[in-house]
Amino acid sequence: MNFALTEEQRMVREMAARFAESEIRPKAAQLDETHAHPAEIVKQLGELKMLGIAVPEEYGGGGMDYVSYVLALIEISKACASTGIIMSVNNSLYCFPVYAYGTEAQKKKYLNPCASGEYLGCYGLTEAGAGSDPVRTTAVKDGDEWVINGEKKFITNGNVVRYAVIAAVTEKGKGYKGISSFVMDLENTPGFKVGRVEEKMGILASGTAELMFEDARLPTDGLLGKEGDGFRQMLSTLDGGRIGIASQAIGIGRSVLEDAVTYAKTREQFGKPITSFQAIQWKLADMATELDAAELLTLRAAWLESHKKPYEKEAVMAKMYASDAAMRASVEGVQILGGYGIPHGASHA
């Protein structure tokens, strides 16, 4: 087995790390405190081709693979979890389904603007009272248009995006076989508006909002793929999304670990740094081991996706383990830092 990165993958990781440390980390705490969308940072990410990393260059993307995506997203998330999830959603939940299921005309119209970073996209799936099941939003044909009615909840990027992929029922009574996907330009969709922007406990520079459709109209060419294919498209899109969330979790965990190591080297008790105490050493060792394991799981899933091999199980495993590893690292990091564990303005990492 060859675990070595290619030269291109190493360059992507190094570029992302430099950008994250120089341009994102110094601003992260303030963005979090003010709940401000990092518009300038997002623009720069687009210029670096990080908002459509695995999208071919002909559609405005970076033309790279999903391993490069994971490596870059880890570095961005280390510096700012909010920026990380904005990047993750645009890549995994918007660009992927439009590229995978869109027509050539749809790719040129809806993919280029978001893969290039000119605008952001989101994925409208979750609804009140449920996640992906049942979908209550409806889409009904009316001449040469679709009429959309319903509300989507907890949509990441929903308050700042121009483009969206949404799931809606096109044939009632058929269960998941009656769900279809639509891609739309929200700015030019009559009957659409942004609803409530949620109050959250963290990741505050990333907006989470309601998408509200009241007799919203879009052209018939807004259908993504075929009618009734929405559930299948949803499952594959969420598989890719899990790789993105796993990467974000690893970045958060690594930021915690680095802060904990730095602090433990300088914090003294009984005349020596606390890194000399075995209890602290065990905590740091466990954190490092679990985060390395999470990264390997995630890179495996990304490699499989890049090589067009089945990766559903591997993506689920990566997300589950990486999320838990990040949580455990955060808890242990607070324990190591003690009273400095949750200072004002530090929820960016």
Image (tube, rainbow, N blue to C red):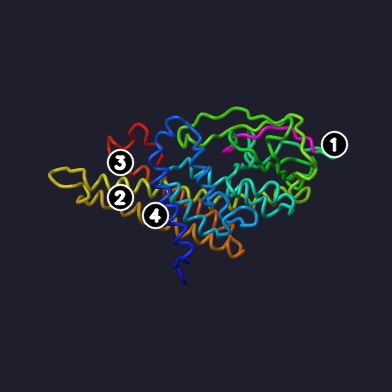
Residue 59: x %, y % from top left: 65, 54
Q: Earlier in the sequence, mark 3 or mark 4?
A: 4
CA distance for labels 4 and 2 = 11 Å
Dots 4 and 2: beta carbons under 8 Å? no
Residue 345, quarter of picture:
top left
**What residue did someone put label 1 on?**
142
Q: Kindly give the residue lying farthest to the bottom in the view shown.
A: 1
Identify which residue is drawn at 73% across, 54% down. 104
Q: CA distance from mark 1 to mark 4?
A: 53 Å
Q: Residues within 10 Å of mark 2 (few under 14, many from 20)?
A: some
State the extent of the magenta-drawn residues as a range: 146-157
Q: Earlier in the sequence, mark 1 or mark 4?
A: 1
Q: Where on the picture, by quarter, is residue 89?
A: top right
Q: Earlier in the sequence, mark 3 or mark 2?
A: 2
Q: Amino acid at mark 2?
A: Lys
Marks 3 and 4 in Cβ contact (< 8 Å): no
Figure check: 122 above or below 345: below
Task: Between residue 186 and residue 127, name the one nearer to us.
Answer: 186
Label 2, on which residue?
283
Instruction: Check disc 3: other Cα within 10 Å, few if <14, some if 14-19, many if 20+.
Output: some
Label ID, residue 290: 4
Q: Nearer the viewer, mark 1 or mark 4?
A: 1
Q: Report the mark closest to the observer, 3 or 1.
A: 1
Q: Which comes sooner in the sequence, label 4 or label 2?
A: 2
